[in-house]
Amino acid sequence: MKSMKLLSPTGHLGFTPLEKGSFYEGIQQYPDLIAADSGSCDIGPYPLGADTHASPEEWQRHDLEVMLVEARRLGVPLIIGSASDTGTNRGVDQYVTLIKEITREHHLPCFTLAAIYSEVSREYLLERLRRGEEIEGLDGRPSLTPEVVECTDRVVALMGVEPIMQALNQGAEVIITGRTSDANIFAAPAIWAGFPKHLAYYMGKVLECASFCAEPFMGKETVIGTLTEQEVFIEPMHPQQRCTPASIASHAMYERMNPFFEHVAGGVLDMRQCIYEQYTDRITRVTGPRFIQDSVYRVKLEGAGKVGERALAIVGIRDPSTISYLDKLLDWSRMKVQERFGEKDFQVFYHVYGRNGVMAELEPQKTITSQELCIVTEVVAPTFERAEEICALASRNLFYARLPEVKGTAGTAALMADEILRGKAGYEWTINHLLPLEDPLELFPITLEQVGV
């Protein structure tokens, strides 16, 4: 192939349904492949730890149906990464079932369906640790210990391009993968087709979130990347969007501690020497990325463990005097909780929207400028009943706080409802580590079957 055209219709399959208009515009370009990522850490640790999906299955089915029908009509591969938000075995099986149902409903001709799994058992990790191996932590985490593994409910490994390429070698036409780096679902088929790694990984990095790489901002719109042996071209399919050097470069730097490096299993994409050119009014051309192979092949592990049950209450603050004494207000609530419950097996959080509810201690604006605040009181405890009781005391004491200069008896807060809301269970990220592998395929079993009529 002298060039390869890859279509990306959504940056997170099913998170909200993809936009069909630009998708079908992209189909008119006759892409060589359709691919979409379905996973993210942005949704927090709960879906992984609880092994559930974050988006309604009907939305996921919507996106799968739109993509599968057109991929089979064109006769091009369809690759879905990190199935059902987290890439657990359950997620892969869920998507395989949906693919089969859609195939039957549309009477699609026979094709080869591959499922690639990526869950890692705790027993496997404990055995590696018993051998004295070090599993290095990321972002300042210490190396993995048996204690951390034991408090983890579920672990996935982020596969590299090799399992996807192996499935293509085995004749797969539709591939559903467990957890993988976003870029790999685009890079794998490009590398398999013979294109340079540095351009393939760069293509994947830019296409991973679909229309986020174009301007003006529009979510869930389709973009197409065209790859040659020397360059990458990125074009949006929505008629009111355009890809510019600024929009492409900014997205290439998106979600990175160091904006110039994209780490994947087996190496790192170096974007420091990238050159961005406005090729047409709506297309940007990119050259210059490099790919640096790692001396040791390692895959990232993600793990989540349950902390407890969650209860929530919503309280509004409108009185200017109370707002001026906000820290004293929160201190009063904490004091009353401690008086009754001590400091044992629970956690209390006050999320103050209007001050720093979004960014917490990272918020640069320290002066409150809102005329009203919303305080979401969150409690995590071993049981919901205990969390509910603590949350009720914490939120109601925002009403009863004894503050300086208060003359009225109406209370210092307005409860949206005298009701404690039940949240989903509380989970935390327990594992964010790098696992060395001798064989890039060893943790990722592949199953193949014939589907269709």
Image: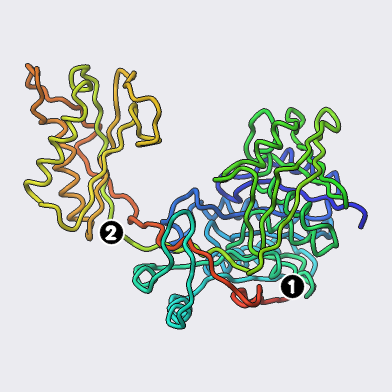
Dividing the picture into quadrants, the one containing residue 114 is: bottom right
SS of the residue under disc 2: strand
Residue 320: x and y in percent read 22, 17
Eyeballing the image, is 219 above or below 147?
A: above
Q: Using the numbered discs, state the Cα–Cα distance from disc 1 to disc 2 in whole angstroms.
A: 40 Å
Say which quadrant the N terminus sits in: bottom right
Q: What residue type is labelled 1?
A: Gln
Residue at 18% over, 24% down: 325
The answer to whether residue 349 is left or right of residue 151 is left
Q: Pointer 1: residues within 10 angstroms few (<14), some, or many (20+)?
A: some
Residue 437: x and y in percent read 60, 74
Residue at 59% over, 54% down: 38
Q: Which residue reaches farthest right?
A: 2
The answer to whether residue 88 is left or right of residue 101 is left
Residue at 74% over, 27% down: 240
Eyeballing the image, is 2 above or below 91?
A: above
Q: Mark 2 points at which residue?
A: 308
SS of the residue under disc 1: helix
Q: Nearer the viewer, residue 135 or 264?
A: 135
Dividing the picture into quadrants, the one containing residue 396 is: top left
Residue 236: x and y in percent read 76, 37
Q: What residue type is labelled 2?
A: Gly
Residue 222: x and y in percent read 72, 42
The answer to whether residue 127 is left or right of residue 227 is left
Q: Which mark is residue 166?
A: 1
